[in-house]
Image (cartoon, grey):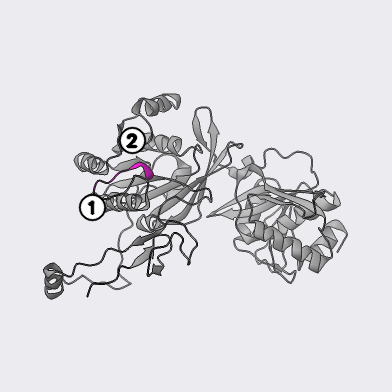
Amino acid sequence: MARAPAFSCTACGASHQKWAGRCEACGAWNTIAEDAPLSAGPAAKSLGAARGRTLPLSDLATTEPEPPRAASGLAELDRVLGGGLVPASAILVGGDPGIGKSTLLLQAAASFARNGLKCLYISGEEAGAQIRMRARRLGLAEAPVKLATDTNLRDILTTLDAERPGLAIIDSIQTLWADMVDSAPGSVAQVRAAAHELTAFAKRRGSAVILVGHVTKEGQIAGPRVVEHMVDTVLYFEGERGHQFRILRAVKNRFGPADEIGVFEMTGSGLAEVQNPSALFLSGRGTPAPGAAVFAGIEGTRPVLTEIQALVAPSPLGTPRRTVVGLDAGRLATTLAVLEARCGIPFTGLDVFLNVAGGLRVTEPAADLAVAAALISAREDVALPADCVVFGEISLSGALRPVGQTENRLKEARKLGFSTAIAPADSKPGAPTGLRLRHMPDLAAFVGEMFGAG
């Protein structure tokens, strides 16, 4: 009896008995594909009857040397990669169109090549003349980088096998076409097949492969999520087009810490590294103004100070607006609810606008107290002291919960000239010399002491 076809979602892996346009498990559209059944012929029977080789086993105490790394010379890129490029690794880089992915990778390829690594840059989106023009603008025309333009996966793999590069950059994975897959370029099946073949090449030949991926309007890398599971490292290149700052963030890294960031500045001659992002994000601060609070955050392993800005104004609408840039809108709604329920500060009938200066995106809960401080400062039209930094997580009861790496946050604040820090009462490490640490037990005490209300 023939087996009924089975289907699964390429985004979340959920199984389905029949094809549908939308996955009921994750809500993704056009991600359900038929699973290819195993052959039931003589080959399958012989495979089950034949004995394979015994796999070598080891215990957890077995030590292996650290993988060698190739430094690019770009300190911010090496930081995000975990210390440098690892041979036989597959890296996926995603970002919005026009954010600077091709510029970053062309600069990285030139830097690796100048350090002795054989580099190939293969583009399926641009002509060779366009890439050479960009290289001249960036001052990289003399860099020993090999260039090719094609979209045929079979030809690309043949070229890579012949050249044996130390690093191959494919721009982009959505443009490749595999002739053994019966679907259009950019489809789920094509992207999955191309990623599998290129990742297998990296492991087989010991070459590092960087794949460029487009992102959807939700900010996720387009194509099946299985591609992110195939590769060793997933990087996102973030930033607002209106800002000159760009953030390279590691969301997955098998060879280093995840959530590490590298900060770049977009200039007329390409991307420039930012060695001290805190000083750059705070460079535009002048006279203290209502609605501004400096947050001492942690991005990966580095402390980063940034300014959180709030604006509160009467709303002419029946439903007031809540506009957030650089923060989670859900955290803002929670903070507003706690301020009203635990501190008696209502925001009914008021529009609330919240922004992180410089285009940085803050995700850690430690920003709750800085968000609350900016909101109350804007509502009461009272400026916070210019020499003060704030951090702490707010619970639903109004209590302030301690956060990790307090010592690193305080050291960074002191290095940049701040003299006062406000933190939850249970924060363990003491303040460095020259910095006064003020402990707050709950949100009501913070509001009462800083703003004379609550």
Name the amino acid, label 2.
Ala
Q: Does the magenta-highlighted stretch encompass residue 177?
A: yes
Mark nearest the camera among 2 and 1 is 1
Question: In the current view of this chain or complex, which residue is farthest to the right?
Answer: 452
Q: Which residue is mark 2?
A: 113
State the image quarter where residue 170 is shown. Answer: top left
Name the amino acid, label 1.
Arg
Q: Can residue 82 be seen by looking at this rendering?
A: no
Q: Mainly helix, strand or loop, the magenta region? A: loop
| Residue 223 percent coordinates (x, y) | 41, 52
Residues 258 and 363: in front is 363
Q: Which mark is residue 204?
A: 1
Query: Which residues are the magenta region?
Result: 174-180
Dot 1: element:
helix
| Residue 381 percent coordinates (x, y) | 85, 49
Residues 433 and 327: in front is 327
Indicate left or right for 135 with 43 as reference. right
Q: CA distance from mark 2 to mark 1?
A: 22 Å
Mark 2 burial class by Cα count in 10 Å: few <14, some 14-19, many 20+: many
